[in-house]
Image (cartoon, rainbow, N blue to C red):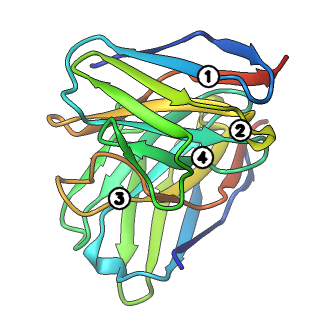
Amino acid sequence: EIVLTQSPATLSLSPGERATLSCRASQSVSSYLAWYQQKPGQAPRLLIYDASNRATGIPARFSGSGSGTDFTLTISSLEPEDFAVYYCQQRSNWPPGWTFGQGTKVEIK
Amino acid sequence: EVQLVESGGGVVQPGGSLRLSCAASGFTFDDYAMHWVRQAPGKGLEWVSLISGDGGSTYYADSVKGRFTISRDNSKNSLYLQMNSLRTEDTALYYCAKAPKGATGGNYFDYWGQGTLVTVSS
């Protein structure tokens, strides 16, 4: 089973600052990595799929990069509504399975 | 607009059963695989199960295999999760999630419902 490890666990930043979140896979997942944002009391929302493609309606300040085992989610300039928990996620082809990282909380400094 | 609305959660004793439902709208339901994903209180996300668009293929996480059954009724645009032999560790918010087109079950989850809470407690 592929394990996804996110770092840091918590990121304390101020609005306007740049956020860089990391997700490392225990073995290559090619480019099949997605990122989600979850705010308290809300369902996760897809931000990035296939490592670098923004989902519908996602602002350009969110970007994803990486391939193989190392991936990054970057928020270029934090808006107040961006403070949330972020999860990365990958799929395994056989047996089919989908796993998530443990999450990174982006909090207001 | 894609909408997914879960229902059926509640409080159940260990060993009991519960059936969750997810009503889908805003897309051609039988064209897409669907998933259940859960989140224990204060914890991360865990994939539970997948069903293909025609209902012919199903997959489960090891943690629920043999206890949970996923199904769908495409005539009613509805997804289900029958949960038997429930354990305290099954306590979670259960989300239904839509897969994009592509490889079996898709590589990610493009739309999520708001979830329904299942509490397993004596």
Residue B115 left/right relative to B35: right
Mark toward the viewer: 4 or 1? 1
Task: Identify which residue is drawn at 60% across, 29% down.
Answer: B44
| Residue annotated with mark 2 | A82
Identify the image quadrant of the N terminus of chain B: bottom right
To which quarter of the image does residue B87 belong?
Answer: top right
| Residue annotated with mark 4 | A44
Residue B4: give x, y in percent of width and height: 56, 70
| Residue annotated with mark 3 | B99
Q: Is residue A88 above or below residue B110?
A: above
Is residue B63 something that shows in the picture?
no
Amino acid of disc 4: Pro
Identify the image quadrant of the C terminus of chain B: top right
For the residues beneath circles 1 and 2, the answer to whether they share a chain is: yes
Q: In whole angstroms, how far apart are the C-alphas of marks 4 and 2?
A: 13 Å
Residue A100 left/right relative to A69: right
For the residues beneath circles 1 and 3, the answer to whether they share a chain is: no
For marks 4 and 1, the one nearer the N-term is: 1
Residue A42: give x, y in percent of width and height: 72, 50
Labels 2 and 3 touching (C-beta < 8 A): no
Task: Identify which residue is drawn at 18% across, 35% down.
Answer: A95
Mark toward the viewer: 4 or 2? 2
For marks 1 and 2, the one nearer the N-term is: 1
Q: Is residue A5 above or below residue A30?
A: above
**Along the line of sight, which residue is nearer the eye, B118 or A19?**
A19
Circle 3 marks a residue in which chain? B
Labels 1 and 2 touching (C-beta < 8 A): yes
Q: Is residue B31 above or below residue B67?
A: below
| Residue annotated with mark 1 | A19
Q: In whole angstroms, how far apart are the C-alphas of marks 4 and 1?
A: 19 Å
Mark 1: secondary structure:
strand
